Image: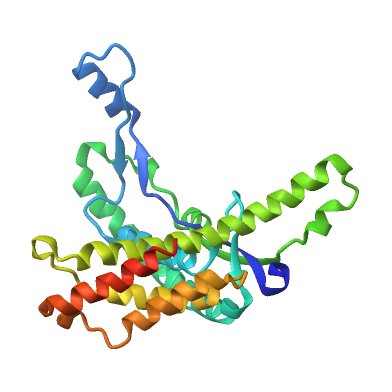
């Protein structure tokens, strides 16, 4: 059962946007263009002229991407499904990410007074000191939290629930499980389809080494995310893994016969969908 092999994980990441709408400039733009109604808003980049906040946002972006890559969709409120076989790897990586996030945030706090001065010089007439929160306020806007919870069994929902709602709640649970597995099939289809297109060799298409690297990574990921032990998905994964054995991107670029043979094997896997 999926309840015994997985947990739910909530990743709560927050970071100061560093953007502020300028009402005066927005109104001025409307006036200068003689608009008949409010046509848009002008947002200032408060850290203009510096890259420190962008660096923090990049860290957050990488964390979110890795989180989504290593979990499966579950609910609309942001919870993701994490197979227990991947739990310790996930926990270790998130601890590393948290250290990286805290270090980047602390560096930003240390540089913040100088960054505001640079922004004042860069923004000139658009600079407003009141747009900039204190460091203590920034700390409340930047946060990193990971919370785990058990996957509820359909029986957990049935306690005290009228009969007419039981089937509906059970169906919701089934739909979420199916959506999680569909996400894996979609990932596999995307990689295979991309490979097939690039290996076609039309107009001597050049493909990067990542064409194979991404496929290898996906094969490894599917071994831990196949929470329902979908036999057909595992078969497709194994076929892709066999296809990738011994392949080198340089050889594929040079050898038309090898490239087209590999494409044929990839297309054969695609036909399983």
Q: Residue furthest bottom?
A: 246
> Can I make out residue 5 in this image?
yes
The residue drawn where x is 39% and y is 80% is 241
The residue drawn where x is 42% and y is 76% is 219
> Can I make out residue 109 in this image?
no
The residue drawn where x is 31% and y is 47% is 46
**Chosen colour scheme:** rainbow
Q: Position of residue 127 (x, y in %)?
A: 28, 41
In the displayed structure, 145 sits above or below 14; it is below
Is 101 situated left or right of 5 in this image? left
In depth, the one of 82 and 56 nearer the eye is 82
Q: Residue furthest top?
A: 36
Q: Quadrant of the C terminus?
A: bottom left
Q: Position of residue 129 (x, y in %)?
A: 35, 43
Q: Position of residue 143 (x, y in %)?
A: 52, 61
In depth, the one of 194 and 156 nearer the eye is 194
In depth, the one of 30 and 264 nearer the eye is 264
In the displayed structure, 185 sits above or below 240; it is above
């Amino acid at each position: 059962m999926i309840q015994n092999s997985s947990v739910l994980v909530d990743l709560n990441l927050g970071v100061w946007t560093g953007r502020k709408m300028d009402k005066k400039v927005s109104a001025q733009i409307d006036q200068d263009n003689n608009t008949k109604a409010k046509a848009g808003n002008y947002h200032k980049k408060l850290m203009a002229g510096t890259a420190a906040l962008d660096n923090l946002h990049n860290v957050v972006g990488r964390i979110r991407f890795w989180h989504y890559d290593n979990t499966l969709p579950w609910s609309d409120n942001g919870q993701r499904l994490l197979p227990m076989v991947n739990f310790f790897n996930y926990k270790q990586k998130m601890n590393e990410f948290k250290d990286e996030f805290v270090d980047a945030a602390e560096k930003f706090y240390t540089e913040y007074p100088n960054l505001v001065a640079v922004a004042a010089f860069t923004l000139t007439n658009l600079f407003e000191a009141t747009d900039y929160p204190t460091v203590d306020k920034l700390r409340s806007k930047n946060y990193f939290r990971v919370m785990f919870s058990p996957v509820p069994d359909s029986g957990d929902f049935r306690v005290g629930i009228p009969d007419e709602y039981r089937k509906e709640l059970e169906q919701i649970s089934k739909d979420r499980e199916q959506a999680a597995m569909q996400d894996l099939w979609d990932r596999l289809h995307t990689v295979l389809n991309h490979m097939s297109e690039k290996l076609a060799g039309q107009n001597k298409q050049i493909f990067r080494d990542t064409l194979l690297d991404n496929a290898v990574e996906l094969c490894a990921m599917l071994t831990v995310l196949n929470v329902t032990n979908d036999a057909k998905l595992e078969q497709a994964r194994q076929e892709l893994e066999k296809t990738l054995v011994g392949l080198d991107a340089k050889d594929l670029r040079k050898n038309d016969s090898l490239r087209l043979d590999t494409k044929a094997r990839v297309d054969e896997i695609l036909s399983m969908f």
